[in-house]
Image: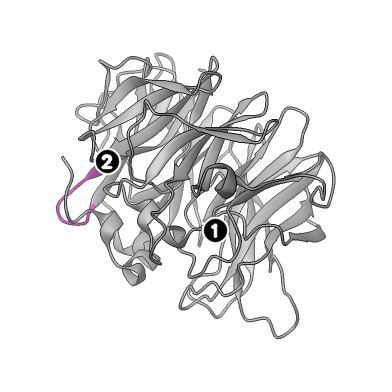
Amino acid sequence: MFSQNSKYTRSFLFLLTAALVLSGCYKEKKKFLQEGGNYVLALRTQGSGNSTTDYLLTANSISTGYQTISSTGNGIEQLAWCYFGTTGNTVMSFSYGTNNVGIGYSLAEGGRLYEKGRISFERMDCFGKGDDSTLIAIGAPWGGGSYDCQIQLIDTRNIRIKKKKLTPLYMRDPSDVLNKWPTSIVVNDNKMYVSFYPLDGVSWSTDLTDTAYVAIYSYPGLDSIAIIKDTRTGPIGYYGNQVNMIKTENGDIYTFSPSSLSSGYTQATKKSGILRINSGQTAFDPSWFFDVETASNGAKLLSATYAGSGLLVARMQKAGTDTAVGWGTFDVENPICQVAIIDLNNKTVKIVTDIPDHGGQYGSQGLLEDGKVYVSVTSTIAGESRIYAVDPLTATASKAAKIEGLEVPAIYKLTN
């Protein structure tokens, strides 16, 4: 089922323009009969050569191993290669093509998707929930020449951009020529926290990897409040991944620094680790740090879904695999990833051995439901793509729905 010419194995330079190259010209959107159901999944399938096709589809259930997630006779083909986001009962797809288009979907009676509206945008590269009717999207500078990011607030009830702010996330000094790529967004206590990392906008070289950065703005006002830094670990997050910060029940924010050459960094000078920002504060907690790389005997934290009670269901890069600069953690055919449970309270890491070693993905988003976290796994070792249901309390997992395609970049559950 796996193509040797998957889009994920292209060269570094080709990846940097993938959002345009992969999508090509827009195709007429195909609508199929939908199965119906409250689960909304993004499905990415392999086409000929390096091409892929994205779908949004619904399902009644995803929890059992005999179910199949398939676009055959089901779902809505998207306009091009997509990022996905959600808030309230709206799912947004952001297609990158000749003209970039965002489409909002909700569920009608019978659990079928319907299109609510569309927006056009220049760039949207990082997404986060503002509130139940607002999705935050930040467009990053691309290719050098500009250092401003476009912060956009999307009204997901009426599918419109209701506010924009053009601003650099951070400038070290007036002579600073590095772009600042946003990696994750969390809102808490009327503040918006944006993690980012500095890079050269043309070469994508990352020469500053000894500090973690977060820009803080008022929300929804978008006024700049502070830039906070910490040198106990490297930059937070990486290109193409949306879950690099999480918020716990009490409002504390935890940040994930991968320090991974396989995630696009051209050097790694600090250990992969987790920092904490206490609820409502505008500084990192100096008394708390988790050196994940040491605790896991060399693995690196890529992303995670918060499962409650201080537990993360994390995607980790295996120890000993970070040997070359590139984009190996984006490659579904490159089995260098594992799923692990990270206990923030006890500072422990435990590998979920029920899940095979597998490849990485763009912006993979898990779903927390009834104490289980559902994650998409594509494993050449197992010879399949599948959703797994992970129990964070026992660090075990069971097979859930099989995926007919490359991966499921997003899993949501909506109500009618």
Residue at 37% from the left image edge and 52% from the top image edge: 330
The numbered mark, 1 or 2, whose residue comes first in the sequence reads 1
What kind of element bears circle 2? loop
Magenta stretch: includes residue 50: yes
Q: Which residues are magenta?
A: 45-51
Q: Is residue 407 left or right of residue 258?
A: left
The residue that mark 1 highlights is 259
- Residue located at (25% from left, 38% from top): 30
The quarter of the rendered structure image containing the N terminus is top left
Identify the image quadrant of residue 381.
top left
**Residue occupied by mark 2:** 406
Is residue 32 shown in magenta?
A: no
Q: Is residue 172 above or below residue 41?
A: below
Residue 130 visible from this viewpoint: no
Q: Residues within 10 Å of mark 1 (few under 14, many from 20)?
A: many
Callout 2: 10 Å neighbours few (<14), some, many (20+)?
Answer: many
